Amino acid sequence: MKRKTIKIMLADAQLLCLHGLKYILDAQDNIKVVASASNHLEILDKGLSTNADILIMDPQQKDYDGFETIRILKERGFKGRIILLLENICNERYMEASKINIEGYVLKTASPDKLLYSIKEVNRGVHYIDEEVKKELLYSDECLKMSRIENERVDSLSQREYDIIKLVASGLSNKSIAEQLFISEKTVKNHLTQIFKKLEVSDRVQATLFAIRSGIR
């Protein structure tokens, strides 16, 4: 049975990068680049007219705030998933990215194979955070400073909540967490509601990024 083609839209202020990504992706059997954009207006226009499954975007735009572009795009009805292609996770204003429902984080230094893998994972509904992004969150000076600021939120967690967010950050599902801690899946969900509130995040990927940056492992 033939696999469904994944429709990709690319957005990057650097035209050379756009052409290179298109060349790599169009060479794949089940991936097709349906649109490319290099500025705010193009992203909004093509994002809403091409019905792409995934938008791969460098939020560093020349004419506009890339994160604001994403927010507007979503508000106007964009239904595709989003992979951020980042120069550096912290310098790209991580806090802005964490407020938006982003499904994938990949550094621009990643190999083509890693980008292709992220596309497949995000397309099947998995939140993907590249290992190099995790390292950036752990070890860069800016992120270390950020984690110190947020230590108070971590300290507000109960021991059980801490255990659960640690398992969430390791990639476990609610069911797996419940089995490991010998509690019900409903109890895990209830704890997660409180954890998200205390950490001031809205979903699992934001909680995972927060946990990585704060050293919860």
Image (cartoon, helix red, strand yellow):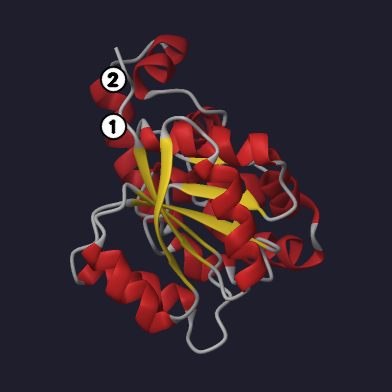
Residue type at mark 1?
Lys
The percent coordinates of residue 83 (x first, y second) are 48, 52
In the image, 73 versus 144, the foreground residue is 73
Mark 1 — residue?
A: 189
Q: Is residue 80 left or right of residue 165?
A: left
In the image, 181 versus 10, the foreground residue is 10
Vertical relation: 54 (above or below) 64: above
- Secondary structure beneath label 2: helix
Q: Is residue 26 left or right of residue 46?
A: right
Q: Are marks 1 and 2 in contact (CB under 8 Å)?
A: yes
Quarter of the image with the C terminus is top right
The percent coordinates of residue 27 (x first, y second) are 55, 38
- Residue 109: tell me if it is visible: yes
On residue 22, which mark appears? Answer: none
**Number of dots carrying numbers:** 2
Mark 2 neighbour density, 10 Å: few (under 14) some (14–19) many (20 or more): some
At 41% from the left and 44% from the top, the residue drawn is: 32
Residue type at mark 2?
Glu
At 52% from the left and 29% from the top, the residue drawn is: 163
Mark 2 — residue?
A: 185
Vertical relation: 33 (above or below) 192: below
Residue 132 falls in image quadrant: top right
Q: How far separated are the C-alphas under marks 1 and 2? A: 6 Å
At 26% from the left and 59% from the top, the residue drawn is: 50
- Residue 150: tell me if it is visible: no
Vertical relation: 191 (above or below) 194: above
- In the picture as drawn, the residue positioned furthest to the left comes out as 77
Q: Is residue 130 left or right of residue 95?
A: right
The percent coordinates of residue 75 (x first, y second) are 22, 70
